[in-house]
Amino acid sequence: MVASLARRFGDLDIAEDAAAEAFATAVARWPGDGVPPNPGAWLTTTGNRKAIDRIRRESKRGDKHREALMVHDDDPHQPLGVIDDERLRLFFTCCHPALAPETRVALTLRMVGGLTVAEIARAFLVQETAMGQRITRAKAKIKAARIPYRAPSAQDLPARVTGVLAVLFLVFNEGYLATGADTDPVRHDLTAEAIRLTRLIQGLLPDDGEVTGLLALMLLTEARRTTRFSAGGELVPLGEQDRGGWDQALVAEGHRLVRERLAAGVAPGRYQILAAINAVHTSSRDVRDTDWSQVVALYDQLVRLDPSPIVALNRAIAVAELDGPEVALATVDRLEHALAGYHAYHVTRADLLRRLGRSQQARAAYDNAIGLAGNSAEIAYVTRRRDQLA
Amino acid sequence: MQYLLSVIHDGTGVTTPTEEADIDTFNERLQAEGYWVFAGGLGSPEPATVVDNRNGEVVFTDGPFVESKEYLAGFWIIEAPDLDVALELATEGSKSCNRKVEVRPFL
């Protein structure tokens, strides 16, 4: 609803406010008057009316402003692009290259994902006021500089796709493992919307390997969603998940996309390699059948593309399965300087120390992890692990 | 919607004949495609004079209002439907004059 109002009126603030007012009116009226026959249409009509009211009010303050809005309101006669999807348009506006990369993610989470400023501030580890200012500034720039609400043309899309995929990946991850301490540990709305938008972009660029790779990666991750949390709300790591509960349709589609990329015979990028790693994991019915040498080989390939400490950490987790925890621990310890503030570093280290029987050090590492983790389900899991130590 | 495309000079030397020819070509495109409003080139800011008449008693100050290695060396004012078009034109403009270009919307 915000997306369609934003497109119609060319202004994110007006769209957000009008949608909120429409819902507030509904809450006030429906209990007394009864729910209208078509609640969605009622809300849209009310939202449109609220937006027009606000523009009328504002137009008294400045004709120039109104003029800008009218010019921007290209609805409904302009020929549409390849895909007519309002949220996709809004998404492309939010991750416009004229905005700073970190602002693009924040704005997408706000406008497309519907997260509150407070939730986004927590995800970025910044003060709520600072995040509020960043988002307000971005919206003001969209309006003042007239960043358009539209998907780029087929010829312009390839130039923007890398930045767009980075935002989609981060939105998906925020849904997959929400960072807020008092939010749901998993936000299915975010993962679903990230997948939906990635599918639309894959439809626009079917031959782009990284778009397909990211879609496959998301599908293979989403396939495990229902098995990632125990009944008690605890995170369940990959090795302990009930593999019979994985969504076989999503697994099959993810595998098909990975095979399609392998058949293309083009050197894979980051998302394709991550998708391939997930394809290996989702190929074994039992964790003990996992082809760890294949996983490590894929991580070796990824390290060459992206020699970041986080990739090295994930590679070490696979190395532990192949060469044992001692070898892995040596690698992980070398990452301390870069990753001391990252909870997954401490979880990994704690787990390796536990497997080596070094309980005291493992306990300290679990404590560090608990102090740094933001996801409530993950904290519950790590706490139990710590308390199980001898 | 009008945008100011400011040409930022950062000490890469004076405009060469090749750059001048490329700027001419770019200007012709702006005019042919209806984006052109106005454009101009500026000399170095050294001969500038700052005039301050805010207090009813005018003060003239010799030199530019801000001392900086980077300065405005010219500009285009264009009419474009949105920022995507303005950025595309600025991309070509930056190549033609071989300098950075700042894109700013008019109010």
Image (cartoon, coloured by chain):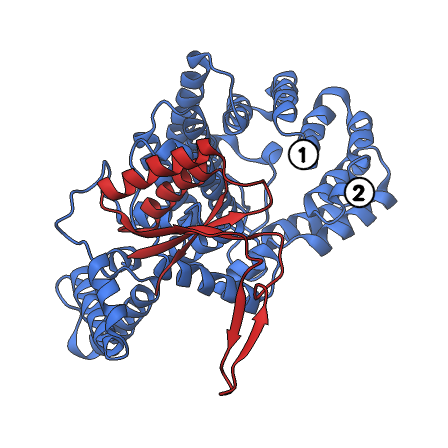
Q: Which chain is blue?
A: A
Q: Residues within 10 Å of mark 1 (few under 14, many from 20)?
A: few
SS category of the residue bearing label 2: helix
> Which amino acid type is shown beneath numbered disc 1?
Ser
Disc number placed over residue A337 in the picture, else none: 2
From the viewer's side, name the closer residue of A300 and A23. A300
Q: Is residue A118 visible?
A: no
Residue at screen point 83% across, 30% down: A330
The picture places residue A94, in percent across and down from the top left corner, at 40, 51
Name the residue: 12% across, 49% down.
A77
Q: Quadrant of residue B85?
A: top left
Chain of residue at mark 2:
A
Q: Nearer the viewer, residue B17 or A201?
A: B17
Residue tagged 1: A308
In this rendered view, identify the residue nearer to me: A280 or A386: A280
Amino acid type at image mark 2: His
Image-quadrant location for residue A160: top left
Query: Judging from the image, what is the letter of the chain drawn in red?
Result: B
Vertical position of residue A263 compared to residue B76: above or below: above
Residue drawn at 81 percent across, 25 percent down: A327
* Residue B37 image point, x, y percent: 28, 53
Element at badge 1? loop
Expressed as whole percent of the image width and height from the top left, the position of residue B7 reads 47, 48
Mark 1 vs mark 2, CA separation in Å? 13 Å
Dot 1 or dot 2, earlier in sequence:
1
The vertical placement of A350 against A298, above or below, is below
Labels 1 and 2 in the same subunit: yes
Q: Residue at x 29, y 66 (%)?
A: A19
Instruction: Check disc 2: other Cα within 10 Å, few if <14, some if 14-19, many if 20+.
Output: few
Q: Quadrant of the C terminus of chain A?
A: top right
Q: Nearer the viewer, residue A272 or A155?
A: A155
